Image (cartoon, rainbow, N blue to C red):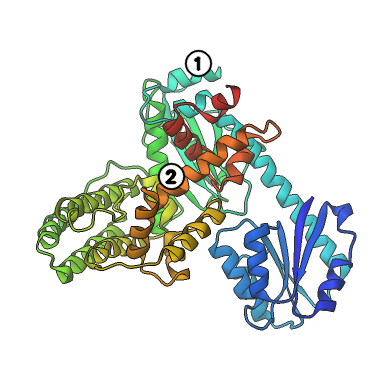
């Protein structure tokens, strides 16, 4: 049964919605009726309902604000907003903030039931999409691992696929979060193009294409135009042959796709060998000198110059990761003796794209890392620290950012980072990862859960990333662990 929470500041209205249709016959159960937005938010974070039906106009936390909070916590909960006002502005806001539907009071039972039917279809599509993650279990995870040198030919032999044409490309596609893309079904015929489709994330599909770049270059363009128009961002690798490592082409396509997403630029991007500009090289040299001399004003100026160049030149996300890690290395070099407990962690480009949405956010983080070095005489009671850790422990399955926790407890980002490292012995991101992986081991003991369902329950959205983390920490894949 899918769970429903009803929120309205008028109890009789909430009661009416709860009894308006036969929820059980539709596969839903009402788990509660709440009469204010703040209480509703607390119940939502605790119970994680599948659907919230909320009035828009409520004292304190409005329905729109409740929806914003749900989206800010990156919960999967769907929201249907209800209003007694037909003002188009309300509907616009509801759609802008990701409401599943918008209904006008007095609610029509048929319209409510129709909305629930549509929601059920979407939920089923999502469930089917997660089941496709099973394609990544076993050998495929190894094929795409950059540390391996398996060739395209090796992959085709393993998958019993024959490549008849000379050229290969990988294409990575990132779709809107509420979609369940399917590429292999219903394609137009392409006589000179062979496509192997792989789901490499709930909202990400990767395609290995075999074609002839010299003889049939337009067929690739036709395929992208006809089959990939719904993708939000598309990354196209360079050309390879049958002896090319498959992981190289996959990584090229993923890098340019994530780079387009990070810079929020064009839908389609082609991979080109990256080059760090002379300006950034010079800024990094000056930055090291400024950090060494503790010239905070100049440090901020230089970081802004680097950030602007990254935006202007649309530097690939893997190169931005190199720049970020170089700054972290400089901080370690000159300031480790002043702040040994700071969370100065090196990040891969996959971690950066999950933690930050724009270059501005990333470079703001860099500035905060440097600012925290000047913080002195940190004093927080043991009771306050326990509350923070308890809060994290109760919500580690969600995408809870360190900055959100800092705001909640009225602490600076650097201050909170230091406290967590002192209390747990590891960085915040490491602590969350260890908690999730420990829970994953427990859930994998339940044979009724698929690996994809385990991934979803512990808070990861990308099966491929989870598989890499699990194997890195435990030496075997989740599927192998389950067989022990």
Residue 266 rendering spot, x and y as whole percentages: 43, 56
Q: Which residue is mark 2?
A: 235
In the picture, the quarter occupied by the C terminus is top right
The residue at the point 67 percent across, 38 percent down is 186
Q: Is 404 placed above or below 337 here?
A: below
| Label 2: how many Cα within 10 Å (few below 14, some 14–19, many 20+) | many
42 or 380: nearer the viewer: 380
Residue 102 rendering spot, x and y as whole percentages: 72, 70
Residue 223 rendering spot, x and y as whole percentages: 53, 40
The residue at the point 64 percent across, 78 percent down is 62
Q: Which residue is mark 1?
A: 157
Q: Report, in whole angstroms, how far the alpha carbon at label 2 lies from the one at label 1.
A: 26 Å
Q: Secondary structure at mark 1?
A: helix
Q: Secondary structure at mark 2?
A: strand
Residue 292 rendering spot, x and y as whole percentages: 11, 59
In the figure, is residue 287 to the left or right of 7?
Answer: left
In the figure, is residue 297 to the left or right of 72?
Answer: left
- Label whose residue precedes the other's in the sequence (2 or 1): 1
| Label 1: how many Cα within 10 Å (few below 14, some 14–19, many 20+) | few
Does residue 214 show up? no
Answer with the quarter of the image where residue 362 lies. bottom left
Q: Is 216 placed above or below 428 here?
A: above
Answer with the quarter of the image where residue 264 lies. bottom left
267 or 445: nearer the viewer: 445
The residue at the point 63 percent across, 68 percent down is 41
Mark number, residue 113: none
68 or 43: nearer the viewer: 43
């Amino acid at each position: 049964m899918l769970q429903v929470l009803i929120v309205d500041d008028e109890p009789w209205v909430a009661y009416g919605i709860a009894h308006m249709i036969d929820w059980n016959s539709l596969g839903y159960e009402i788990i509660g009726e709440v009469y204010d937005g703040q209480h509703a938010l607390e119940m939502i974070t605790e119970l994680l309902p599948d659907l919230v039906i909320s009035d828009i106009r409520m004292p304190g936390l409005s329905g729109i604000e409740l929806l914003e909070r749900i989206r800010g916590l990156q919960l999967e909960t769907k929201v249907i907003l209800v209003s007694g006002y037909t003002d188009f502005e309300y509907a616009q806001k509801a759609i802008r903030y990701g409401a599943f539907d918008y209904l006008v009071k007095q609610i029509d039972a048929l319209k409510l039931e129709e909305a629930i039917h549509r929601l059920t279809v979407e939920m089923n599509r999502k469930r089917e999409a997660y089941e496709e993650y099973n394609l990544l279990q076993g050998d495929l995870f190894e094929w795409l691992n950059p540390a391996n040198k398996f060739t395209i030919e090796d992959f085709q032999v393993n998958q019993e696929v024959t490549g008849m044409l000379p050229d290969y490309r990988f294409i990575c596609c990132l779709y809107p979060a509420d979609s369940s893309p399917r590429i292999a079904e219903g394609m137009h015929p392409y006589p000179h193009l062979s496509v192997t489709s792989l789901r490499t994330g709930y909202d990400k599909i990767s395609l290995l294409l075999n074609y002839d770049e010299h003889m049939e270059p337009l067929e690739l363009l036709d395929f992208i135009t006809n089959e990939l128009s719904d993708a939000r961002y598309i990354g196209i690798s360079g050309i390879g042959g049958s002896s090319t490592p498959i992981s190289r082409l996959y990584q090229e396509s993923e890098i340019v796709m994530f780079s387009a997403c990070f810079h929020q630029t064009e839908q389609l991007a082609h991979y080109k060998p990256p080059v760090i500009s002379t300006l950034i090289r010079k800024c990094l040299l000056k930055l090291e000198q400024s950090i060494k001399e503790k010239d905070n004003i100049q440090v901020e100026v230089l970081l802004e110059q680097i950030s602007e160049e990254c935006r202007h030149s649309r530097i690939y996300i893997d190169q931005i990761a190199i720049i970020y890690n170089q700054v972290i290395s400089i901080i370690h070099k000159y300031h480790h003796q002043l702040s040994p407990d700071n969370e100065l962690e090196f990040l891969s480009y996959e971690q950066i794209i999950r933690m930050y949405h724009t270059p501005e956010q990333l470079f703001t983080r860099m500035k905060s890392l440097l600012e925290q070095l000047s913080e002195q005489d940190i004093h927080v009671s043991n009771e306050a620290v326990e509350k923070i850790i308890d809060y994290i422990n109760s919500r580690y399955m969600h995408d809870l950012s360190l900055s959100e926790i800092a705001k909640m407890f009225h602490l600076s980002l650097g201050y909170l980072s230091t406290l967590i490292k002192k209390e747990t012995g590891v960085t915040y991101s490491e602590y969350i990862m260890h908690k999730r992986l420990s829970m994953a081991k427990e859930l994998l003991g339940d044979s009724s859960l698929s690996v994809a369902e385990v991934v979803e329950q512990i808070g990861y959205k990308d099966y491929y990333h989870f598989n890499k983390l699990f194997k890195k920490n435990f030496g075997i894949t989740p599927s192998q662990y389950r067989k022990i």
